[in-house]
Image: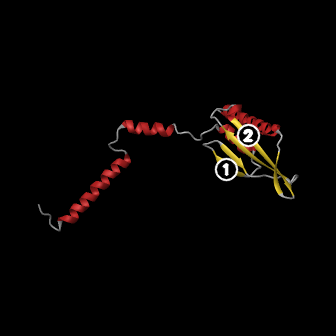
Amino acid sequence: MTISRTRVPALLVSTVMASVLLTACGTLGIGKSKAKKQSRAISTAQAPNMGVNSFLWRASLETLNFMPLEQVDPFGGVIVTDWYASAEAPNERFKANVYILDTNLRADALKTSIFKQTRSAGGWQDASVDADTARQIENAILTRARQLYIATVDGQ
């Protein structure tokens, strides 16, 4: 079978048009089964917004909003601040690490670590932190998370 030179452009145009139409059908969902469409809709509808409790997350960010943030991971539940020194005590600085460990609003879903350094002639030196400091920050976060939760429930 021989194809004349005048038929080659027509054949090429026909082939391109057919492939464009078939591609469009796949993009528009023509010819796909309902099961595939439904499974795709279910998988996207059930996709989580974040990997941790949103009330604990927001409360942690609000409680530590005066400190500069170094690392923030809403899916892993990690908030790490940079060093912060207040104007009242410029010779000491603090750093906080907050870990949200669960998707439930519970006290044991929150872990806070506080670090302190003091300035001396040789630079910044690690210093001890009162064990109650981390607990006070955790309590402030939990209190704010409860307030956010109550405001959401009352608003519905």
| Residue 123 placement (x, y as % from top left) | 82, 57
| Residue 141 placement (x, y as % from top left) | 74, 38
- Asked whether the residues under the numbered discs 2 and 1 touch, taking CB atoms below 8 Å apart as contact, a structural biologist would say no
Q: Which residue is at the far left?
A: 1
* Residue drawn at 25 percent across, 61 percent down: 13
| 152 w.r.t. 17: above or below | above
| Residue 109 placement (x, y as % from top left) | 68, 34
| 9 w.r.t. 148: above or below | below
* Residue drawn at 14 percent across, 64 percent down: 3
Residue at the spot of label 1: 71
* Mark 2 vs 1, N-terminal side: 1
Distance between the Cα atoms at labels 2 and 1? Answer: 14 Å
Q: How is the image coloured?
A: secondary structure
Q: Amino acid at mark 2?
A: Thr
Find residue 112 and name its label. 2
Q: Is residue 149 visible?
A: yes
Q: Residues within 10 Å of mark 1 (few under 14, many from 20)?
A: few
Is residue 28 found left or right of 82 in the rendered image? Answer: left
The residue closer to the viewer here, 123 or 94, is: 123
* Residue drawn at 85 percent across, 55 percent down: 119
The residue closer to the viewer here, 114 or 104, is: 114
* Residue drawn at 31 percent across, 53 percent down: 21
Count of numbered badges drawn on the protein: 2
Q: Amino acid at mark 1?
A: Gln
Q: Residues within 10 Å of mark 2 (few under 14, many from 20)?
A: some
Find numbered disc 2 in the image and state the secondary structure of the residue it sits on: strand
Is residue 105 found left or right of 143 in the rendered image? Answer: left
**Split into 4 quadrants, where in the image is the C terminus?**
top right
**Split into 4 quadrants, where in the image is the N terminus?**
bottom left
Q: Which residue is at the far front?
A: 122
